Amino acid sequence: MASTRASGNDLNAAALVTGLRTYFRSGTSADLSWRREQLRQLRKMLSDNESRFLQALQQDLHKAPQEGFMTEVSALYGDIDHALKHLKKWSRPRRASTPIVAQPAKSYLLPEPLGVVLIIGAWNYPLQLLLSPLVPAIAAGNCAVLKPSELAAATSALVAELLPRYLDNDAFACIEGAVPETTALLDQRWDHILYTGGGRVGKIVMAAAARHLTPVTLELGGKSPCIVADDANIEVAARRIAWGKFTNAGQTCIAPDYLLCTRATADRLVPAIERAVREMFGQDPRQSTDYGRIVNSRHTRRLAGFLADGEVVFGGQADIDGCYIAPTLLRGVRVDAAVMQEEIFGPVLPVVELDDFCKVEEFVNGREKPLALYVFTRKEATADRILARCSSGNACVNDCMMFMTAHELPFGGVGSSGMGNYHGEHGFRTFSHFKAVMKRRNIFDLDLRYAPFNARKFKL
Ligand code: NAD
């Protein structure tokens, strides 16, 4: 099945899925050596074309090549290498105990691939969010269709061009396109759908999946709070928050969405964040090759609208046609303003100032469960109290986003920030079914369970 650039009209999604399913049923993809070969080929696709991928990311989001390498390409190398290293262990049957009534027998969980899966990517990390779920899908022995985001057109086109040159074309396809193509794909019966993007489309995906009882993993977003306690190391916190918020011009699903601290802490933190921003991107971030752009003018206009929702402490410049929004910090923000109601997904950082730090949990818990939660404090007890009381998909203490580097930590949301997860073995589990098996022997057949249930067998 060759990788295709299709329009909604000429995409024969049904034929595509039928072809992949026929191949899946041949059993080829279940073979561990085939899986290894596909993973190696995926890595080779990236390494042979590294500079082209970095260029495409720069074209789509003005991503500095170093940033593109760090947050997308090298993250994928890490995923692939980890999967190759652990594939044998992950795919082994897992022993379970057998009760006396079923002895003699062997009980175990047998991981099996799900079948043909659909992976829908988002535009903000257009390479990483598309291929990172493909790694466990391959590792678990599935066939897959990738649907890159049309908003990151250069990356989408490059993956569609290269994937069929490296991977088994009977098992994998990349379908470019927008709503019509995604709709045509969603009409099909899949064995799993992993979707990354906003909650509005997440509901469309889930409704489409429900028609076929297809399980879904939804990697969504939300407003991730960044709590800074009065005792936090302000200089370190400021640098790490500025990095978490302004990398990729704030278009990161796990970027800190807003700051939550007391007024006194805000007075120290805000100038420290401004200093950190100047150190990273200079006096005029617009001139910096290391500062990103907003994906398109529609999103830039949306973000520019937030600038009136508070007092601009620094930044505040916007150029809609140039897709530029300066790293911006807002104080005096009302909690009913749009910037505090919607996910920001851009380089605008509002500060919510509390008169009493004890109110942070009430503030966070009064809103939807976030994808990520950040706490900066020197006191472990403060961090533990907040972690225990506030639900979130992931959390990091004294840093932002770094949990993404740990292969053994699952990545996923909770409540409206998503369902299910992946990364490392968790991804392998997402794309596998663990079949519960009991293997019995033909001896010692206890006749207690067979009728007739007479007094010789039972005294009730
Ligand atoms: P989006 O929801 O617009 O698009 C995501 C995908 O859905 C694209 O491939 C697109 O073609 C498809 N799509 C769009 N409209 C559709 C429709 N009507 N029917 C069917 N398919 C459709 O992406 P977005 O909302 O701009 O992305 C930003 C959101 O994604 C943010 O909320 C962010 O937090 C979230 N996000 C989450 C993660 C994560 O890993 N949890 C990562 C990145 C982004």
Image: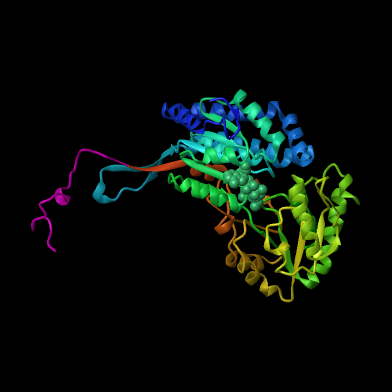
Q: Could you tell me if residue 420 is visible in this image?
A: yes
Secondary structure character of the magenta stretch overall: loop
Q: From the viewer's side, name the closer residue of 257 and 80.
A: 257
Q: Is residue 416 above or below residue 142?
A: below
Q: Position of residue 430 (x, y in %)?
A: 50, 44
451 to the left or right of 300? left
| Relative image position of residue 111 (x, y in whole percent) | 43, 39
Q: Is the residue 362 above or below the residue 314 in the image?
A: below
Q: Nearer the viewer, residue 432 or 366?
A: 366
Q: Residue at x 77, y 58 (%)?
A: 305
> Foreground: 198 or 180?
180
Which of 399/370 is in front? 370
Examine the rendered structure and indicate whether residue 154 appears above or below residue 219. Answer: above
Q: Which residues are magenta?
A: 438-460
In the rendered image, which quarter is residue 313 located in?
A: bottom right
Furthest residue in direction top, as rendered = 165
Which of the image's four quarters has the C terminus?
bottom left
Residue 440 drawn in magenta: yes
Q: In the orientation shown, which residue stands out farthest toward the right?
A: 283
Query: Is residue 237 shown to the viewer in this render?
Result: no
Q: Please identify the quarter of the rendering in which residue 133 is found.
A: top right
